[in-house]
Amino acid sequence: MKKHILILRVLAILLIVNEHLDKIYPYSAMSVGGYLGISIFFFVSGWGLAHSYEANPVGMSIWFKKRFVKLIIPLTIICLVVNLFSIDRFFGTLVGHLVPHSFSQLDSFLPNLVVLYLFSFMLLQFSSKKLLNLLIILCIIPIFLNLFPVIDKEKFDIFYPVNAFACFISGIFASRRAPIFCFYDIIGKRSVYFGLLALLFLHIYVKVIGIELLLFYITIMETIFLFNFMYIISQYINNETFLSIVKSVAMSSLAVYLVHFKIIYAFVALNMQGFSVAFYVFSISVAVSIPLAQASNWVTAKIDFDFAARKT
């Protein structure tokens, strides 16, 4: 996986974890960035799946077997370890996180990711023109939902799954190096820097005044600008030790997502707060998740290899 994608993936999971630290920070307003984090993660997922398919085009049945073996089995193992002393919680976490089944999951990260995996093969067959048309429709949907609220916005975050699809498709476009998504060579480095900075300030302002519809579009634009920004700065990052750490964290990001809830719960139960505690949450979550992710990936590889051996 490319350097800038690995860095983006690490940034995404750190922002997602940071969003859940409201009971840890001295000021709950500091627990921000989750919405941008999940947008980045869906973008990176789209990019990764498209890049994988372009490198090795396969049929639909093989595609789904490989994708879901690599997604479901590691997450099942991680869920089992995280809920080792409670089988009920294990099944509750597994169903709640991995099996899309109700409107209450509209604003849940992993169910949306599973749905995107289900649609991934079909989306990858689309031409760039069809994908662009779909992206335009997705960008119109929030306006329609805002004008005609067919779903109770107080109960469900209706923008979340639309944002997930839009960012996922944007990632596919970026993998195809579409100029509208990969513009670092067109507008220049300074324009990327200042454009990203302007979007971040605009994000903060819109967040304060509470206009969710604008935040939807700003977040997608931020994600695209961050992709271009990370591509530029990754050209200057060549330290092997740093890149090795980034890769380890990036490849264990889903484990970090599941583990950090337990770590936060433990510190809250001990009534511990502060910036140092927030740092401990990040550090312990990563330290536990890396070997856990490596072990689950090893089991997945064995299962995948055994399946391939039986097929031959």
Image (cartoon, grey):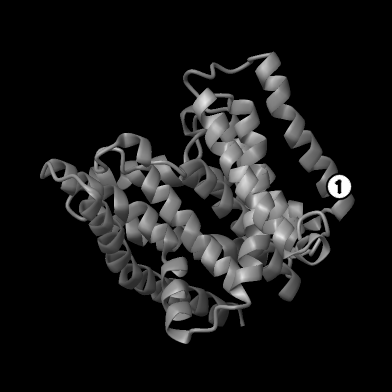
The residue closer to the viewer here, 243 or 93, is 243
Q: Quadrant of residue 205?
A: top right
Which residue sits at x=31%, y=73%? Answer: 291
Q: Is residue 27 visible?
A: yes
Which residue is found at the position 77% from the left and 63% from the top?
188
User: In terms of secondary structure, where does tag 1 sit?
Assistant: helix
The reply to whether residue 69 is visible in this rendering is: no
Relative placement, left or right, of 63 versus 257 is: right
From the top left corner, tell me how far across and down residue 121 is, in percent.
71, 56
From the top left corner, tell me how far across and down residue 309 is, in percent.
Answer: 55, 82
Residue at 42% from the left image edge and 84% from the top image edge = 241
Q: Position of residue 3 (x, y in %)?
A: 58, 74
Q: Which residue is mark 1?
A: 130
- Report x, y in % for residue 58: 73, 70
Q: Residues within 10 Å of mark 1 (few under 14, many from 20)?
A: few
Front-most of residues 75 and 184? 184
